[in-house]
Image: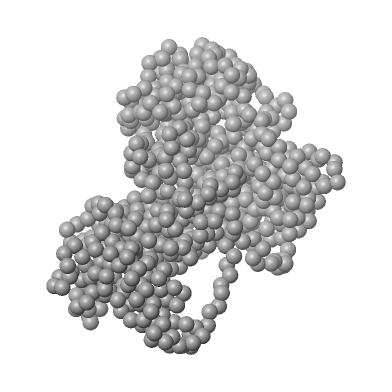
Amino acid sequence: MLISHEWLRGFVPHALSPDALRALITAHVATVDGMERLRADLASIVVARVVKAGRHPNSDHLWVTKVDDGSGDLLDVVCGAPNVSEGALYPFARVGTVMPTGNKGGILIERRKIRGEVSNGMLCSARELGLGEDHDGILALDVDAAPGTPFLEAVPVGDVCYDIDVLANRPDLLSHYGMAREVAALQGLAFGDPRELFELDPATGALRFGDGVRGRVPSAGGQAVHDMTRATSGGVTVQLDDAEGCPRYMGVVIRGVKVAPSPEWLVRRLSALGLRSISNVVDVTNYMLHGYGQPMHAFDLSRLAQQTVVVRRARAGETLVTLDGVSRTLDPRMTVIADAERAVAVAGVIGGKESEVSATTTDVFLEVAYFTPRHVRPTRRQLGLGTDASYRFERGIDPDIAPHALSIAAQLITMLAGGEVDGQAIDLGRAPASRASVAITSRRVERLLGQRVDAAEVTRLLSSVGFAVASRGDGEETLDVTPPSWRHDVSRDADLVEEVARLRGYDALPDVVLPFRPGTVPDHPLHVTGRRIRDALVGMGLFEVRPLPFVAGDDATHARVENPLAEDEPHLRVSILETLARRAEYNLSRMQGDVRLFEVGSVFAPRDGQLPVEKVRVGALVMGSRRPPHFTDRAKEVFDAWDAKALGERIAELAYPGMRITLEAGDGAPVLWRISAKGGEVGTVERMALDKPVWAQDAFGVEVTLGRLPNAAVAAPGGHDYGAGGSSRAPAKGHVTYRPLPTTPPAEFDLALLVPDGVTAAQVEQLIRRSGGDLLERLELFDEFRGAGVPDAHRSVAWRLTFRDATRTLRDKEVDGRRQKILRTLETELGVRARSA
């Protein structure tokens, strides 16, 4: 957001220097990212007085003058301008000055002789200063300034432009008026209200606010006809058919205008913001947008068919040539302004070429409206066209300022372009909704800021920026605060405390460390689980990604977002692997084939006629090399299905600690294994189908749901379904039980088993653990074999078993007894027997 220093001072007469104003705004309002002095090249020019002027002895067209430049000595200066006059003030370039832009740009002023007379500087013309094309004489200054005063201080041409980072929640700051309101509050200055009438000097643009100041300007306003959808005034009929996209629409007819160039002050204010002056009528609409934050549009009334204005939705296939000369196809979801025959503007975004104000325009229809942000935003995205107007409408303008802005704009147009307002203003739509008050107490302010601020101070601060404050008069010093219409972001007491803090200044907060007891608020079990999984996966060499949860999808299987950020991704994902697959394809398209990504995020299951169900899942995708290449490698080791299975098992163990994790074979396309915890399915291991080049390796994905187990009881009303280890009510204790390192030797042996094809390794392991008892410390699968010596429909699978007692050494007889029990149980329940050879 660009703000002009001089324009801002026109609203609030502060005495701050540009640097001081920048510091004030950054400390209390918004960050000033940059500051540009627009005519810094005039900084060395000063105001000088010609004390004496006489003819040059050696020339009939030159003058020899005595000039007072404030240095204490009178300087001899030769001048060729015919309008030099004793006692007058002129801009003066001293010796050593480098001339600014103009016909002498870049020339160094030196002490030199001209026709035999020494000249110590130069009296400057407007053209030499880059202030116009007038070069018939030097620039006479009608200012009250002493000799030696910097020219930029005496003449308001050296504006300063601030580039301010206005956050999306503060659209009220997207205007000079809104910023001036903040500066006035911080400086304790009086502030003119646009709801009051004003007087404007057409020559200078100076404003004077006050009661009853109207001059010859006719009224534009305010025929209150809220909740109506059709009205006629000034010979123009306006109909509001789309109250959802345009809750309020106003307009007024001005006849007999003369379109001409704008006065110099208006051109200067717009050019300070990088805007090109177009004409007096159009420039007024831009002045209102940047001055007061109210976008508006002026239509050439003669080009509106049947003198009719209709606010409606666009028709299918309807086209419009916009002001930038581009023919655009409109969508039926877009709100447009139309006449009796066709669309003439896209609501809140841009006007149409055919109805624009031109040099031949004599009658205009001036529009002011409130267009809803949720309708303007998708329209702007679909058209691929952002404007200053759409930027403000998307964030939400002040809905109450419309009638006052219309009155001001109509007055400005009649002042600068002549003409008269025909009839009263038309005002259609709903009346602005009243804002609900928010209660706040001094105790609440103290609790959040760590510093007591009494009710009187809170009242003063909030009132200074437009809040209505009423005291309840109770012992708690409770205040009922009603936010102004332009503060959409304030809805709770914490927002009010933030206002108090920034208006007092964050540097006013005590620089002390307040008492704090860590651990008083336990972390949510789901967050604890997420951190544990992130740490483990990063340690395993995977990289975390955090993409947005939007995908292309389709309406049958995905929930559609009403106002998507991107038209090609309008749906919420149902799987983490959907977005990880797109990230992997992005890497492959850039010749990066080794991919190890994971994400902990939300997925959304659609429900008919209801909001989707949100769940938190962890997903991982691996492909390519297991580790960076090394010269000792005999062959490149790449991720395979077994790596993905191990990864899925590890994630499930982290997500559901202490529970039995099993993996059962899936259908193979694409699910390879289904992951279960305590009997309930919690995830899958999949072979990913990617759009990948021929050189790329296979990709594998893992996805595990975090939180409540599928077969656990549903949380009570008002509770949540997430909990560590399947509990939705008890928070994680975070206790770790210390176990000393073993001091007794282990007893190990291997079991080579003939396992029927229908029996899974997980089933075998389950029985081994059950039969092995508490002394079984570790169970490791290390081999699988099919071939000679193995019966058909069987496979040979080998496990290594480790037994240990923490208090004594195990005897061979004990270990062999455990071995025999394991073999008997396996053969009885699963048909698994020991391999003899």
Q: Which residue is at 50% across, 13% downward?
A: 237
Colour convention: one colour
Visible residue check, residue 415: no
Visible residue check, residue 824: yes
Q: Is residue 605 above or below residue 546?
A: above
Q: Is residue 835 above or below residue 520?
A: below
Q: Which residue is at 69% across, 46% downward?
A: 493
Left/right placement of residue 743 relative to residue 227 reads left
Specify the quadrant of the image occupied by residue 32. bottom right
Image x and y of residue 216, in percent: 64, 21
Q: Which residue is at 33% across, 42% downward?
A: 553
Image x and y of residue 72, in percent: 66, 62
Left/right placement of residue 163 relative to residue 700 reads right
Task: Count every numbered label the image shows and give the total.
Answer: 0
Image x and y of residue 721, in percent: 53, 50
Say which quadrant the C terminus sits in.
bottom left
Q: Which residue is at 35% across, 68% downward?
A: 825
Image x and y of residue 292, in percent: 58, 36
Left/right placement of residue 837 relative to residue 817 reads left
The one nearer the camera, 741 or 567, is: 741
The one nearer the camera, 158 or 17, is: 17
Q: Is residue 744 above or below residue 63?
A: below
The one nearer the camera, 483 or 203, is: 483
